[in-house]
Amino acid sequence: MRKKFFAKIMLCGIMFALAFAALFTGCDPLEGSIESILEKVKAGQTGAGVIPVSGVSLNKNSLVITLGATPENSETLIAVVNPEDATNKNLSWSSDNAPVATVDENGKVTGFTVGAATITVTTADGGKTDECIVSVENASVTGVSLNKTALTLTTGQFETLTATISPPSAPNKNVSWASSNTDVATVDSNGKVTAIAIGIAKITVTTENSNKTADCTVTVDPSSVTIYNAGYISTGGTNYQAVYWKNGVRTTLPQDSTGTGSSATAIYVSNNTVYTSGYNNYGITSYRSCYWTSNIGTGSTQTLQTYPTSERRFSSRAIVRSSITVCTAGLYSEPSPSNAVHAVYWVDTSPVILTEPSGATGSNAKAIAADGAALYIAGQYTKSDSTIYQHGIYWSSSNNQPVLLIEPPGTVNSYTTAITAVNGTVYTAGYCFDNNLISSALYWKNSSPIVLPSPATGAAMIQLTAITAADNTVYTAGTYVDSTYTPYGVYWTDTTPTTLFFPSEVTFYEAEINKISVVNGKVYVAGYYTSGGLKYPCYWKDGVRIAVGTGIDGEINDSFMVFE
């Protein structure tokens, strides 16, 4: 009887507790266990007016993390719990591939290595979820730069370029190197640039990732300039011997065993071979043209050229090495009493007599140039019944016909001294005199004259003796004297003159300009001056005079510059 009583009392207590829980927690006492009700109480999900979570969403469902793009390689996801006024917005975060990417309690995702991971956010109320697929990638190269965009070296020098990858965090920093002209400069796999020969080359670095590039323009200047001079020395009395000098060091050229003397009139150097033109004397009234070939270690040989006529008076005055063979230009003389001279050129030993203009009484060839296989010969012709006695002229080997050079108005005489040709365009240097015997320097482009401005106030006796053309610019050089007859050199860049100074002790007729060259935009002019009875070869680099060798005891007829 007592047991039944106590059982009723316990049952009433349980019912009271359930009713109390329903009253204060809002839980249905008939639904769920005591444990589930207690869990809801702990989570704060119970009570009058509680709003449950219906879902959760992330601001991104896909995310790319680029390693190195940010200092921490991370980005924070933002989770939005719905509804906005849900009572319990507590969340938990997880990653299914922590070695690739992790996530902290605030949704901050951090990438560690290349790969993919799924980041999941879960609501505490209702276990609602959303996911973000995270891809972790290496940083792509966005650019590359070099420590130098321009570099000047001399032949044989080297320097290493340094490439910098952007961004610095990009893991693939592999690059390759290339030269646009390996004959001028080479580059190895470490960016070491070596200057091979004079010229300009572009060094390019390329990234393995993204193929980004950067360039450096390499200019290779000559490490030295060697001056060659052609001429002769006295061998006693009226006899003389052909020679050439290399930086003042003389080489005697052989002469015909039946001759009484020889002279070198012009010089040309190609591939370490020196070619010198000139003639042998056979007494007073006979001379014969020839050229010499001089190689290092094997000495010099003379090649006698064929007579253009039965007359034995002719000589070479200019020389060039064409793409085919050695070619020289000069003149031959008719016998007395005429003694008229006529222009001729030789291909090796074979003479070609040049056609004279109608009415000409004579001609001579003063200069020769090669443009590939084509030859161009400059000179002048005489016409005694004209008010202009000497006329400038040039010939082409394509037909050996004369091209008359147009003289400026008022010209009395015109002379040519040098010639060059570039891709079929012919430039001839010279000078002319007007009715007052005032000289002017000029050059002809094909046959049209370009008169150059006077190099200085009061300049007189202006003579243009050298010409070259490069990069659509014409460079000419020559000499003039001032009112005290002090000599000066001068070169023109197109029509802009630059004065060249000889030593102060040099006087009138003791200085000459022979050649002009342009290397990498720098102007080199070769010549010589006389001091104390000796000839001193020299050259100017962008207007600055540089002495070469020692004084020469002889006569100089021509100069040539070799850049190494």
Image: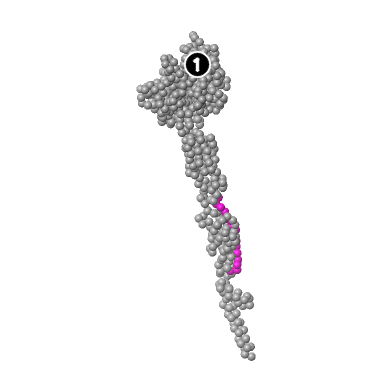
Q: Main secondary structure of the magenta part?
A: strand
Residue 494 shows in this picture = no
Name the residue: 39% across, 26% down.
Answer: 502
337 relative to 503, above or below: above
Which one is in front, 400 or 535?
535
Residue 541 in percent (x, y) is at 43, 31
Residue 473 in percent (x, y) is at 49, 30
Name the residue: 43% across, 26% down.
Answer: 248
Instruction: Look at label 1 and name its amino acid.
Output: Ser
Extreme residue toward the front, this view: 297
**Mark 1, other Cα within 10 Å: few <14 / some 14–19 / many ≥20:** few
Would residue 479 appear left or right of 303 to someone viewing this image? left
Name the image quarter holding residue 238: top left
Quarter of the picture containing the N terminus is bottom right
- Which residue position holds label 1? 257
Name the residue: 60% across, 84% down.
Answer: 10
Extreme residue toward the bottom, this view: 1
SS assignment at label 1: loop
Which region is colored magenta? Answer: 125-140
Which one is in front, 425 or 305?
305
Name the residue: 44% across, 27% down.
Answer: 247
Confirm whether the magenta stretch covers residue 270: no
Name the image quarter holding residue 246: top left
Residue 70 in percent (x, y) is at 51, 55
